[in-house]
Amino acid sequence: MKLLNTFTQRYIDHVCKINPDHEVITGTKGPLKYVKIKNFLENPEDLKEFLAHFPAIDRFKSIEEDSKYSKIYAAGSKAPGIQQMIPQLYLMNLQEYLHVLLNKINYCRYPYDPSIWDFYTNYLDKDIKSFASNTVPHTDPFSIACNIYLTEVENTGTQFFKYNGINKEFYQNKYLQRDILEFNKFKSLSLYSSREEISSLNKEDLTDWEVFNGDSIFEEYHYMPSEYNSVSIYKGCFWHAIKYDAKNSTKERYSLVGAIK
Ligand SMILES: [Fe+2]
């Protein structure tokens, strides 16, 4: 057996091949504009197998090992579950196809530039834990997220939330931050105040993963189901959360995320 697990560009082209029969659907809900692509890939099972070869650090087990760097690493991203970083150069045809499509439908105005794309995966299973209140709605550090779903899991998707403030409602954090009265109130709510400031995690910070269905301040107004071999595209500045019922699901949720920075 060879030491290295190698592959060719032709194989990558095969696993990333776009299904010619895919369907593009656009929609709006309040100020949220979203895009859904159904039947996206011709060979989704092969892409899943290809990606599964990339290593990933188990952040939950690493936190339990109690080493300095694992605790810092684990706090570095509040994304739920386990991530694999995938070099974007391997996925050139996916990013180019998606970018040209988003330009064509006026969803993204920047011209295509390979260097503004990042790819990583999200993996969630029944052992997922929550930390730093990462089940509650968040906004992304990048502008547009393209989520390609590679497993069939019932009752999983992306929930979108609006914040019911004192005098008005907000769909995006950036508008809330411009309103000092409202933003100070938001920061005083303990669940939402400290999550960005955590720089190191201990095993005591890990708790059971609970589906967030809203509370007295956040209200769900839209839901995009994560259908197998579909792509959900939205702007990361809108509050959203992953819906995944870890307690009752026997299936793993695995997706490839292409992000425009
Ligand atoms: Fe997100």
Image (cartoon, rainbow, N blue to C red):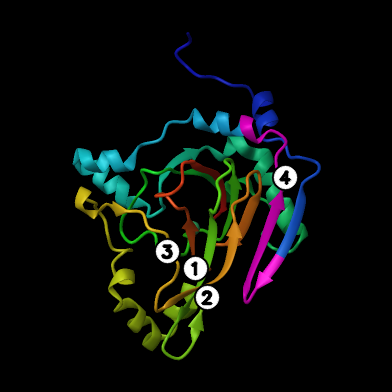
Given this view, does label 3 or label 2 mark the residue nearer the observer? 3
Q: Amino acid at mark 2?
A: Tyr
Relative height, residue 240 to residue 44 (above, below):
below
Instruction: Say which residue label 1 marks.
Output: 239
Q: Residue 65: x, y in percent?
A: 21, 38
Residue sitting at 32 percent across and 42 percent down? 59
Return the disc, 2 or 1, that comes first in the chain's sequence.
Answer: 2
Looking at marks 2 and 4 on the same chain, the residue that comes earlier in the sequence is marked by 4
Q: Does label 3 or label 2 sit earlier along the sequence? A: 2
Label 2: which secondary element: loop
Coordinates of residue 186 in the picture (x, y in percent): 36, 79
Of label 1 and label 3, which has the lower sequence position?
A: 3
Tag 4: amino acid? Asn
- Nearer to us: label 1 or label 3: 3
Q: Which residues are magenta?
A: 27-46
Tag 4 secondary structure: loop
Furthest residue toward bottom? 167
The answer to whether the residues at label 2 and label 1 have Cβ atoms under 8 Å apart is: yes
Q: Are marks 4 and 3 in contact (CB under 8 Å)?
A: no
The picture places residue 165, in percent across and down from the top left corner, at 43, 84
Mark 3: give few (<14), some (14-19) or many (20+) Cα within 10 Å.
some
How far is mark 2 from mark 1, CA to CA?
6 Å
Residue drawn at the location 20% of the way across and 52% of the way down: 204
Q: Does mark 4 have its CB less than 8 Å from ligand 1?
A: no
Please state which of the two labelled residues, at mark 4 or mark 3, is closer to the viewer. 3
Examine the structure image and report whether residue 40 is included in the region drawn in magenta: yes
The mark found on residue 39 in the picture is: 4
Q: Are marks 1 and 4 in contact (CB under 8 Å)?
A: no
Read off the residue under disc 2: 171
